[in-house]
Image (cartoon, helix red, strand yellow):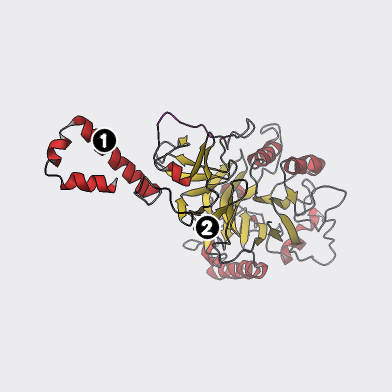
Amino acid sequence: MTTILKKLVSCSSFGRLLREERTTLIIIKLLAMGIVAGTMWGCTDSNKTPDPGRELEFSRYDIEHSVAAPPSDKIGQIKLNTDREWIGGEIIYSERDGRFLVRDRHDGSWNTTWAYAFAYGTFSHKGIRPHQSATYICRETGQKYTVGSDGELKPVGSVQGGSEKEIRVVSWNVGCFTKGTDAELKFTDINAYEALCKEFAELTWQMGADLAGICEYRPTIFDGRNISSDIFGCYPFACETTDADNYHGNALFSTLAIRNVRSLNLGIGTALEGDILIGGTTVKVCICHATWWKNRIDSDANWRELKALAERYRHIRNVILMGDFNVMRDRQDRSWNLFADAGFIAANRATGDSPLLPTTYSNVLVSDAADNILVKGGRIANFEIIQSTPEGCDPLTPNPADKAKWDSVNLSDHFPLVCTVVFP
């Protein structure tokens, strides 16, 4: 096409050709195809399939959407728009379909074909199946992929510089940095504020987590200062919810880049999610804080929210779900089974007569495992709860009347959960 355009430009009668309607339409179409190809493929040669060793770029690796999503997965469903012969937009790899699709940047519509789609693989009704001999690279992350025996993309090493597929995770309800007693308190004494930050930052550093999910988070508790830098400044990547009122704030801090971040409205409770790469594997991560009551006014908000979370991730292969689930003690088995049925395993044992480890929160209404880390697609190792036990108290049978004693030796009324998650 480049050759044709050069000849047209050099032609002395180019102005006359432009006045001919048919020729003008042809040129416009050629130019449009060239723009799309240059943007989406980085090549203007439309007549040759790339060399087998060439790295083909695509925009984004998607673990959520699917052409063949079942009716129970409304969030992941794709409705194809195949009215146009080809479509401009972002080339996206759908992990669930094992196919490349294109998504229009303007209206969000999906299609199976685009200019030079043939270069990316073979056509099917689900999209373009990758070439067995080609190498692909995600422009968003820099991650490289080869093609497996079933046509699926397989990560080559890791953009983090190795092939390590494990991550150290912490889930912590920080109680608005007031031990859960006040969701609006602001410090007026700079020395008291800095002393608090020092304690939290030291414990955060000692835990050494790659990913920290924080609920009951507040971005600032002293005018002109930001918690993100004063306590969690050791993390290069951070995202926070905009709504931090009434204990609803959530935050994710990570040594790995977080992409596709979004806040989730569970009803009354809140959650914050994003995608990270762990050893080349794309993993959905989420910190949640479910409603901590059920009553006649709100009906059973806690149950509705737990069910919504379980269903949201039912069809996604790799997930780390952290948070304060506020599971009610009188139905803890039923509640945790929602997640077990969706394919999750729990770090803090969720069923049985006694918890695996000491409770994370001393309340007679909620489960001993109210705070938890749930995982899909990986296994959990080295799980621990970090707490200091006051003299005369039993961590296995906490008494809410002893709250002041627990608060005197811990930074929050909830205790951090730390574990290692390993993906195959």
**Is disc 1 placed on a helix, strand or loop?**
helix
Q: Does residue 206 appear to the left or right of 46 in the view shown?
A: right
- Quadrant where the N terminus sits is top left
Spatial CA span between label 1 and label 2: 38 Å
Query: Is residue 403 rendered to the left or right of residue 207?
Result: right
Q: Is residue 107 depicted above or below 381 in this figure?
A: above
Residue at 26% over, 38% down: 28
Residue 35 is a magenta residue: no
Q: Amino acid at mark 1?
A: Ile
Q: Please tell me whether the stretch drawn in magenta is mainly helix, strand or loop.
A: loop
Q: Amino acid at mark 2?
A: Gln
Camera-near label (1 vs 2) is: 1
Magenta segment boundaries in residue numbering: 76-84
Q: Going 54% across and 66% down the picture, which residue do you hit?
A: 233
Residue depicted at 63% across the width and 32% down the height: 70
| Residue bearing the label numbered 2 | 143
Crowding around mark 1 (Cα neighbors within 10 Å: few <14, some 14 to 19, many 20+) is few
Quadrant assignment, res 206: bottom right
Residue 231 location, x and y as percent? 57, 65
Instruction: Answer with mark 1 or mark 2, whichever residue precedes in sequence.
Output: 1
Residue 151 x, y percent position in the rendering: 59, 46
> As rendered, which of 295 and 51 lies closer to the eye?
51
The quarter of the picture where the C terminus appears is bottom right
Left or right relative to 372: residue 5? left
Q: Which residue is mark 1?
A: 26
